[in-house]
Structure formats: structure tokens, C-alpha cells
Amino acid sequence: MTESAKPTPTDKPDIFETRESAVRSYCRSWPATFARSQGAKQWDEDGNEYLDFFSGAGALNYGHNNPAVMGPLIEYLQSGAVLHSMDMKTPAKREFLQTFQDLILKPRGLDYSVMFPGPTGTNTVEAALKLARKVTGRQHMLSFTNAFHGMTLGSLSVTGNSMKRGGAGIPLTNSSKIPYDDYFDGEVPDFLWLEKVLEDSGSGVDKPAAVIVETAQAEWLRALSDLCKKHDILLIVDDVQAGCGRTGSFFSFEEAGIEPDIVCLSKSISGSGLPLALTLFRPELDVWEPGEHNGTFR
Ligand SMILES: *Cc1c(COP(=O)(O)O)cnc(C)c1O
């Protein structure tokens, strides 16, 4: 075959369109086939360079193929060390927990139990919701308008988007929505609705086990934290996307000076773009029975 007769990538039958499920989505917005990546850049098969502002929706805070991560990762993969361990002890898990304690928790004065809930963001949210319900004995959850917490049923029940919710195919119950900051364009003070329904026994909103929130504004977060404490409601911060340095500090709530009862981390926590998730909670909340929440890939 001469050089000019070589099929270009665009001549290939598009297996993505003929074989991959209609559920595919991001690849519809970005038709390029990305072949290489480094730092903030990606290259398609034809060598066109792209600046990656999407960054795996927050899974690549430290960049594509960061050498500081890839070196030790490749070394580990080739070393004959344990790759799959369920939740058994390995030196790697020890080193991770020790490092997370020494570099992330201790310097911030945070004392959280660390749970490995299964490798994705929605796994850590499910674990958080389950734990909050178990600790408080309450079923109801509060979440915010336009919140996104994941695609499994529990996470969907606290997610706003009606199209995503519709995909559940069953009623998504046991949750109410709170207007997010500035939902009424500043015409109504933030939290008016929340304060009112919590204090009004006629509101018809069952007392929740927890409020789950994606953070944004420090002042607002403080008020939410205070309100939760006042009413003995757990505060879950879903830091899956905003955590791991995304807002400057490691946790997105640090600047607000609050200590959520439960924190969800995923997306960038593995450092490499590979899946990993953590659920952090105050040790007093660690009421799990051994194996009560389980998973093959933790
Ligand atoms: C992405 C995301 C999730 C879900 O994570 P998955 O890994 O896609 O299940 C949950 N919460 C927030 C805030 C997210 O950004």
C-alpha cells in the first residue's frame, strides 16, 4: 500500500457509532479520537493538539500522565505486588492510609475514619447516604436544586436533573430539595425555605438524616453547617468534584472553616485518572458492622 492509499482514521468504519450503546454522551460533543495526553494537553489520532479544559470532569486535577504519579504506578504494576486485594491488608494500603493521615488529615486537624466504598463517585455517595440513615435512624434526605451526586438510585434520589432522574425508572423517594444559593436571584434570603421547613412542624418535610451538598461559597456553607448542627442533622459534603485541590485547598470546605460529618471523595483522589473513592466520617459515626457495606473493587 502506498503512503497516500493508507486509510485515514476518518475512513475507518466508526465502531463507536455502530457498536457502542446510544448512552454514550461526551464523545458526541467531542468527535475527535484522543490518542495521547500529557499534562493539560491531548492529541487526536491525526496529531491535532487540544487544551483539555474538561479534565475528566475533575478526575485529572493533577494532569494527564503526571510523571510523579505514573513512575511509581508503573513500578508498582511491574513489581509483582498485589494488584487486587478486596479490602485485605497490603503494604500499599498501609502506605496510602498513613500518607493520607499524615499529609491530608493531621495538618488540617481532621479526625476522620477512612472507608473505601467501591471505586466511583456514586459509590461514596451511596455509602454516605446509607451511613447517615443508619446513624440517625431517619430515612429522609435533603439535597439542593441542580445538585449532581451520581447515577445509582440513592445518588439519583438526591440529584436534581430531571432527565437523569427519569432514567431510574422507579420513583426516587425519601428526599426533598432545598433551593441552592441564589436560586431566587437574591430575592429571598438563602436558607429561608430550609430554616422555615425545619422549624415549622406543619411543613410536611420529614426531618432528614442528612443534608448533602456540593460546596461553593464559604459564607453560605457556614450557615448551612450551623443550621445542621442546630437541628441535629448530619452534613455530608460531596467533594467528589470540588475536592482534591480543585478549589485551591485540598478539601473545598476548608476556607469555610467547617467540619462536615461525612465527606465524599473520588474523581482525582487516585491522582492518575484511575477509579478510587473514599468516604470520610467522624469516628463516632463509624457504626458499620464489618462487611455491612462491601464491594469487590475497593
Ligand atoms: C462526578 C460526581 C459524582 C459521581 O461520580 P461517578 O464516579 O461518576 O459515579 C458524584 N458527585 C459529584 C459532585 C460529582 O461531580
Image: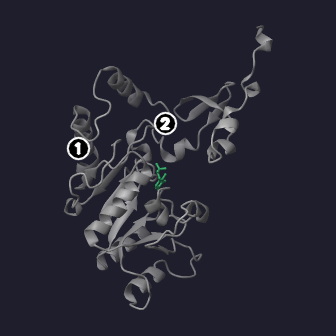
Q: Residue furthest right?
A: 4
Q: CA distance from mark 2 to mark 1?
A: 24 Å
What quarter of the picture does the C terminus occupy? top left
Whether residue 26 sits left or right of residue 131 in the image: it is: right
Query: Which secondary structure lies at badge 1?
Result: helix
- The foreground one among 293 and 102 is 293
Q: Nearer the viewer, residue 34 or 11?
A: 11
Depicted 50 relative to depicted 208: above or below: above
Please identify the residue farthest to the bottom as the structure is shown: 202
User: In the rendered image, which residue does mark 1 sit on?
Assistant: 102
Q: According to the image, what is the colour scheme of the structure?
A: one colour
> Where is residue 80 shown, x and y percent of the image?
29, 21
Q: Report the residue at 36% width, 80% height from top.
A: 207
Task: Name the residue located 27 percent from the left edge and 72 percent from the top edge.
Answer: 136
Q: Residue beneath label 2, please?
A: 63
Say if 99 sits above or below 157 in the image: above
Residue 142, image x and y in percent? Answer: 43, 72
In the current view of this chain or complex, which residue is farthest to the front? 170
